[in-house]
Amino acid sequence: MTSTYGINVAQEEKDLHPVFKTDPHKLWNYVNKRVILSTSEGVSYEGYVYTIDPVTHSWVLFSCSNDEDTHKMNVVIVMNTSVTDVNVFDEECPSWVLDMMSQYGKIHEIDLSASQIAERRDAVCRWFGANRIPVNKSADTLTIANGTVTIEPPYFPENCSSSNEIILCRVRNLLTTLPNNDNMSLSI
């Protein structure tokens, strides 16, 4: 079939990347469900679906250890290219698994006093000054590169944000090199 513009519609649909052919709701229906994924290598993976990458269709599973009383979980990534069969179980995802999933990938919060945060802010400002990078202070927020990067308390690399990934990476790298005497050796 040809469109009014002379484009072969059937060929165009065939050439579409799979991400445009997959219904995201179908993928979403697997999330938080217990599944067994069979692979072309003959290996089976069992666990609770944390997410499915919508582009590569790789599966991220939380897999329980043999002793479920210990609540130990492993994160397993299964590439879509090897998945041959998906067996879904209708059972509810246990609350402790949901709790672990909600904490996965989160940065643990650091409990600092107001004086420790102020000390850290001053140390960061001194460090950027020593590296000839001007820092603007407004309330608790530090801005760098004419506002391109902002650093929020408690002023660690994960507290930086920017739409410019290159500058953001450089600022984060500089923060990781903050000398130990100014780094307030904290246990996270």
Image (spheres, grey):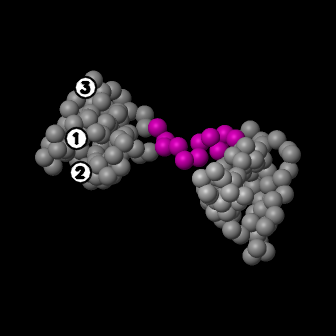
Magenta-drawn segment: 98-109
Q: Is residue 93 above or below residue 141?
A: below
Contact, mark 1 vs mark 2 (Cβ under 8 Å)? no
Residue 97: x, y in percent?
71, 44
> Percent x, y for residue 63?
72, 56
Q: Amino acid at mark 3?
A: Ser
Please state, as top left, top right, bottom left or bottom right, where the N terminus lies in the image: bottom right
Residue ID at (43%, 38%): 110
Question: Badges 1 and 3: C-beta atoms under 8 Å apart?
Answer: no
38 left or right, relative to 106: right
Give coordinates of residue 101: x percent, y percent.
65, 44
Q: Nearer the viewer, mark 1 or mark 3?
A: 1
Indicate the quadrant containing the C terminus: top left, top right, bottom left or bottom right: top left
Q: Secondary structure at mark 2?
A: loop
Circles 2 and 3: CB atoms closer than 8 Å: no
- Amino acid type, callout 1: Ala
Callout 1 environment at 10 Å: few (<14), some (14 to 19), or many (20+)? Answer: some
The residue that disc 3 covers is: 138
Residue positioned 13% across, 46% down in the render: 132
Residue at the image position 84 percent from the left and 57 percent from the top: 87
The residue wearing badge 1 is 145
99 falls in the magenta region: yes
Give yes or no for residue 74 being in the magenta stretch: no
Q: What residue does disc 2 label?
A: 179
* Mark 3, secondary structure of its residue: strand
Badge 1 element: loop
Select label 1 or label 2 by which is in front.
1
The kind of residue on which mark 2 rests is Pro
Residue 173 in the figure: left or right of residue 47: left
Residue 62 in view (yes/no): no
Picture quadrant where residue 25 is located: top right
From this viewpoint, is residue 136 visible? yes
